[in-house]
Image (spheres, helix red, strand yellow):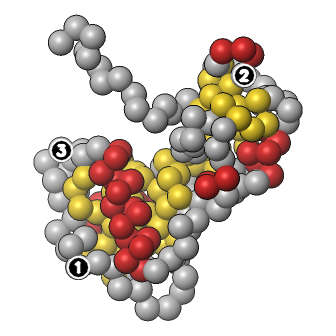
Amino acid sequence: MILGVDTGTRTLAAAEHLLHTVVRALGLPGDAVGCTHLVPAGLGMPEPHLACSLEVPGGPVKPPAEVSWALGGERVGPLAEGAALAAAEHGRSGRVVTFPGRDRLTGTLTVGELRGGSAIDRVLVLATPDPPADDALVVTNDHVRPIWRDGLMTLLTMPAAGGRLAPAEVPNPTPCCADHA
C-alpha cells in the first residue's frame, strides 16, 4: 500500500525530514521506499509545495496527527488531495529519499556496486545516450537521491573530476543568486 502525506513543506530538506519522521512514527524500517513529489498550486495551497509518498505494509496504518494523509480511498486533513497526488505518483515519478541499500551508498562505488547493493535499477549520465559501464566509478558524496523514470528507480549522474561520475543532485546546492545578491 502507498501512503501519501502532506504538511505543505516548501523545501527538499523539510520534505525529507517529514518523510523520516513518518517512517519513525509508523515504526517502519529506514529502507522503506519513500519519495518526495511536487504538488502544484491549488491542491490545498495557493503555491506549489512538496508532499511525500511511502510504501507501507498492508493492515492498519496510523499516520501522525499533524499531517494530512491519503491511503487507498481514505483522505484526512486539509492537504489530503496533495497527499493523494503523491501516493498516486509513487513508483512513476518523484525523488526517492529512502530505499533498500541507501545506507551502503557511501564513498566511491562502481555503477555495478550501486545497482547490486541497492534498489536502484539503473544509472544514467545526463546528456549522454548510453548508460555508463558497470565499472565506472561514482563519487556519491554520501548523498544519493534517485528518481522514478519509466517505472525504474534511476540515479542521474554527471561527469566529475578524474573521469568519474557524481550524482546529479548535490547535497548542499548553492542558492541561485548567492554570488551576486
Tag 3 secondary structure = loop
Query: Do labels 3 and 1 touch, CB within 8 Å?
Result: no
Tag 2 secondary structure = loop
Tag shown at residue 65: 1
Q: Is any atom of residue 50 visible in this view?
A: no
Q: Position of residue 135 (x, y in %)?
A: 86, 32
- First-in-chain label (3 vs 2): 3
**Quadrant of the image occupied by residue 146:** top right
Image side of residue 17 versus residue 140, left or right:
left
Residue under circle 2? 164
* Amino acid at the residue labelled 3: Glu
* Amino acid at the residue labelled 1: Ala
With respect to residue 177, does 144 lie above or below?
A: below
The label nearer to you, 1 versus 2, is 2
Query: Do labels 1 and 2 touch, CB within 8 Å?
Result: no
As measured in the structure, the alpha-carbon distance from the residue carrying label 1 to the one carrying label 2 is 45 Å
The label nearer to you, 3 versus 1, is 1
With respect to residue 48, does 168 lie above or below?
A: above
Q: Position of residue 170 (x, y in %)?
A: 49, 31
Query: Do labels 3 and 2 touch, CB within 8 Å?
Result: no
Q: Residue at x 59, y 59 (%)?
A: 99
Q: Residue at x 37, y 70 (%)?
A: 22
Tag 1 secondary structure = loop
The label nearer to you, 3 versus 2, is 2
With respect to residue 110, does 63 lie above or below?
A: below
Residue under circle 3? 47
Closer to us: 122 or 163: 163
Image side of residue 162 versus residue 180, left or right:
right
